[in-house]
Image (cartoon, rainbow, N blue to C red):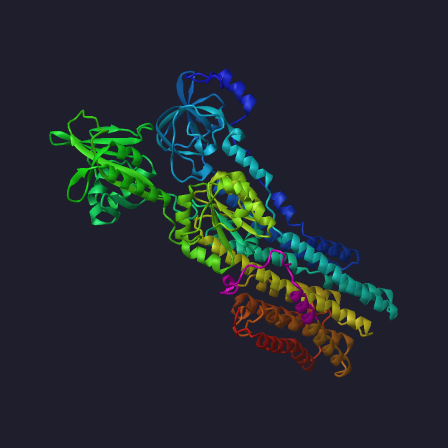
Amino acid sequence: MDMLHTRRTGLTPPEVAARRTLHGSNVLAQRRRRGALAILLHQFRSLVVGLLALAAAVSLILGDRVEALAILVVLIMNATIGFVSEWRAARSMEALLHLAQAQARVLREGASVSLDARMLVPGDIVALEAGEVVTADLRLIEAEALTCDESVLTGESLPVEKHSRPLPLDTPLVARSNTAFRGAHVTRGTGLGIVCATGMATEVGRITALVDEAEPASPLETRLDALGARLIWLMSALCLLAVGAGLLRGYPLPEILRTSVALAIAAVPEGLPVVATASLARGMTRMLRRNALVRRLSAVQSLGAATLILTDKTGTLTENRMKLSRILLPLGDVAAEDSRAAVTLRLAGLASDAAADPMDAALVEAAERAGLGADVPAVTRHPFDAERRMTAQIFAAGSGVHVVVKGAPEAVLAACTFERTETDVRPLVAEARANWADRVAEAGSEGLRLIGLAEKTGQNGDDPWHGLTLVALMALSDPLRSEVPDAIKACRRAGIRVVMVTGDHAATAARIACEAGIAQQSEPVLDGEALARDLTGAETFPVLARVPPEVKMALVEHFQRKGEVVAMTGDGVNDAPALARADIGIAMGHRGTQVARETADIILLDDAFPTIVEAVREGRIIFDNIRKFIVYLMACNLSEVLVVGFAVAAGLPMPLMPLQILFLNLVTDVFPAFALGLGPGSDRVLDRPPRLPSEPLITSGDWHRVAVLGLALTAAVLAAFVAALYVMMLEPGEAVTVAFVTLSLSQLWALFLVRRRGSNLWRGEEMRNPFVLGAIGLCLALLAVALGWPGLARLLTLPFPGWPALSLAVGASLVPLVAGTVVLSWRQTQSGLPSGKA
């Protein structure tokens, strides 16, 4: 009290005002809300979007208003899709994080008042009761059977007993039993404490500050920009070569400018940003249906590349509730459902209060589940005492009383003189006491929490703490979620290593890890102190226990330096810095703290670990789809550039007009690319290891596919164009229509040539993708409109060439598909891949 200059009656209003001026309000710093304008401007940060805007400006300068308008439509589509998706995600997060403001009971000038917890200042006297949340860091001055659940701060799953005795200043956080920390839940008892820290000065605030040091970054947008830049430079070089060839051949300047515009439009991948945004947005929507709220569109794709998941234990792998695992009787252990446990369960129900704490609730639940719920009122109740470490319930029994005592196993054993077997009561001799001590140690090594149970009969007024008969020791645990082992197996099958990182005891962590399948029974556990000295130990240990927040963040950084793509799961304040530093931070929606949810990239609304596996699957599908539609778009753009470039270099008439190329890019390119981006993906996507973190978005093999496919399309179009000019002797305008139709159709059939290596044409993903079939049907209809509607045909300069010429175009367009299918089948046979493998 002297250090904080306060008194038992509380502060006066002038003192409160002065301290609030000095320390500020009792609030944590929160990230600034992203407004509509910021989200909208973010949509225009892509390099490709900038290039499209430049192309629109150039078209306006040249007087080609239709082309400029079409490009602006694409820009608006892209911005709208991205804005709506990010806006919905941001507002969903705000709804999730909107919590009622906590209240605190405070002594002010001797009177107890309830006020907004934000108004607390250092030196305030705050009262605590079971069921409340601690709203500031408190140095306790009174503690009556007080226990607090501090799992959100320390990771320890069991309630911590509190007292008001002084402790050394260098006492570590997990051992400060005379302090109640902000964010902790009072599970039992009452207390009185002096506010010693508020807002960002609390332990929660200190960890929140660590979060701000870490800024997560996903590489997808950067890689797309880099790819767009590379593609533009490549296409620009080809355009310059074509224009140079035209100049050498003596083409007039207006014709050269018209060719330059056509090549520029062909070189810009108009569909890339909008299709990428749509693909990620659809992945986000699919994940939301599976109870995963994605805060950033690229987070799901990043999770698809994850090689390591660092998972918390409490509330993530476990149910975050106590459950009676087994009962230790004098003659052996029995399950809670065993008939021999009936008497014990009834006594446990009598001695417990479901509203007191999680352990009492677990005992009452076990008794009720066995049909042994007790509603006999106690005559006298002795609450839990931190020094005695036991509680007693005294019931009327004839002319005497029945005493039931429950508490720490060591304390209960010391208070017992006898032990009861199924048939008799016998003295608790030294040999039996030694046996019980061994059993207590063995259960503790398994991570179980033990509660001793004893009884006696006597007269009212007798000392309830001596001469007791030991009934049993109750072993409790925080049970594993039933679906977790299958999820761990799926992660292992997908080539993802799972490591448990918890602030809990090593024995408890080891037991849960073995049950989950993360570790084997014989594998040791690395504790936080050893880990802090040498982080390399984490590379071989599957379970890390007693890990403080700073070490968790350093651990993430260590694995990232090793080339791992790290996903970090957690729900507590202590997890937030690592969540922020990780490549993908995953927080729990129900049990997660506000700090953890605000920090994470993905929030599991059902707190279910298997949802992470679904996110991994979705991420891999999204990446596969993005890679396929990029290959498709680049091949299409390359074919358009080469068709014009080769024709000009060869002295042929212009085979495609600028507005025709823009029509192709906006219709027969974008809609099929959309279909590839929205595909359902392979059923076996989790049966392969993650891609290497260093693997580029487009590999050398993909560039080879782009080149081969682009050249094949070019050859088909130029062959049809030359045949129309010099074999069928069509007018140049009609030959242009043949080239346009050939390129349009061949690009549509190219959808079936970008499938994964080893997949079958008829049973592949594309044939099972309704969007692909729908896109082909839509594009064929639009192509028919472009040819058959006189107004649009005149705008696009597409005179009808006659049915024989159109038959030539259809036949030529099928040549790349047939040749490509034969080549892919031959390569599949040579490589030994089974038919239909996806």
Give the residue furthest to the front. 431
Instruction: Name the one closer to the observer, 467 or 550.
Output: 467
In percent of width and height, residue 83 lies at 60, 49
Q: Is residue 832 above or below residue 659?
A: below
In percent of width and height, residue 755 lies at 58, 69
Left or right position of 548 against 484: right
Q: Is residue 672 visible?
A: yes
Give the residue furthest to the left. 399
In percent of width and height, residue 747 lies at 65, 70
Left or right position of 212 against 8: right
**Residue 699 part of the magenta segment:** yes
Q: Residue at x 34, y 39 (%)?
A: 358
The quarter of the displayed image where residue 37 is located: top right
Give the residue furthest to the bottom. 727
Instruction: Name the one closer to the observer, 583 or 640.
Output: 583
Residues shaded magenta: 681-710
Count of numbered labels shown in the rendering: 0
The quarter of the displayed image where residue 100 is located: top left
Q: Is residue 378 above or below residue 310?
A: above
**Residue 339 part of the magenta segment:** no
Instruction: Name the one closer to the observer, 742 or 148.
Output: 148
Q: Is residue 322 visible?
A: no
In percent of width and height, residue 404 lies at 22, 34
